[in-house]
Amino acid sequence: MRSWKRMLPLALASGAVAFVLSATPAPAQQRPCMDDLKKLCPDAKPGTQDALKCLQSHEGQLSDACKARVARGKARMEKGGKTREACKGDVEKFCKDTTHGGGKVRDCLQQHEADLSSDCKAALTAKLNKQKAQGGASTKPN
């Protein structure tokens, strides 16, 4: 059952939030949403689901660069589909304040492996089996 851990980064949308908001200092063009986040969502912690939700709720007020980044983040999140949905409650319950990116959500869920919902465990296992059947597709986030 531990083999699902290798594919967790793909299974969850953790990379999507990190994709939208970089937590490490970088030139403005690499962090197009930081100014928008500070202005529109001052209470949201960068790199969290709350930050992404807040930015999405202010979509009409976002800079063009941030709108494009949020759109790409949404597209990546949609790819996670069933697994992301099955594990959503577990991420909210155990890892709500965990900054996304760098495998932090995966690590958080691994710490709570015994407490994960059966739906999340089943979805992760199914995702891994599907990847194995497709020739062992990479489990690293894009």
Image (tube, grey):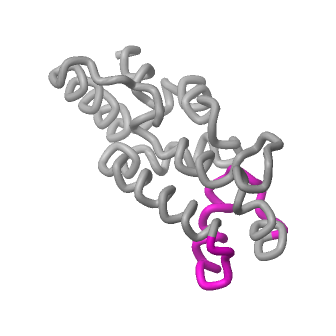
Task: Name above or below for residue 83 compared with residue 75.
Answer: above
Q: Nearer the viewer, residue 133 or 98?
A: 133
The answer to whether 123 appears left or right of 37 in the picture is left
Image location of residue 12, percent across then percent down: 45, 41
Q: Is residue 43 above or below residue 130?
A: below
In the displayed structure image, the side of residue 120 where residue 128 appears, left or right: left
- The quarter of the rendered structure image containing the N terminus is top left
Residue drawn at the location 72% of the way across and 55% of the way down: 29
Inspect the magenta stretch and tell me whether residue 80 lies in it. no
For image coordinates 63% across by 66% down, the residue present is: 65
Left or right of residue 94, residue 8 in this image: left
Q: Is residue 108 left or right of residue 137?
A: right
Q: Is residue 27 above or below residue 42?
A: above
Up/down of 96 relative to 107, above or below: below
Which sits in the foreground, 87 or 10? 10
Residue 50 on the magenta span:
yes
Q: Position of residue 122 (x, y in %)?
A: 29, 33
Residue 134: quarter of image: top left
Q: How many marks?
A: 0
Q: Which residues are magenta?
A: 42-64
What is the residue that sits farthest to the bottom in this orientation? Answer: 60
Q: Residue 10: where, in percent of width, then height?
A: 41, 35
Observer-nearest of 112 and 50: 50
Residue at 59% over, 48% down? 19
From the top left corner, tell me how far across and down residue 28 is, in percent: 78, 55
| Residue ID at (65%, 48%) | 96
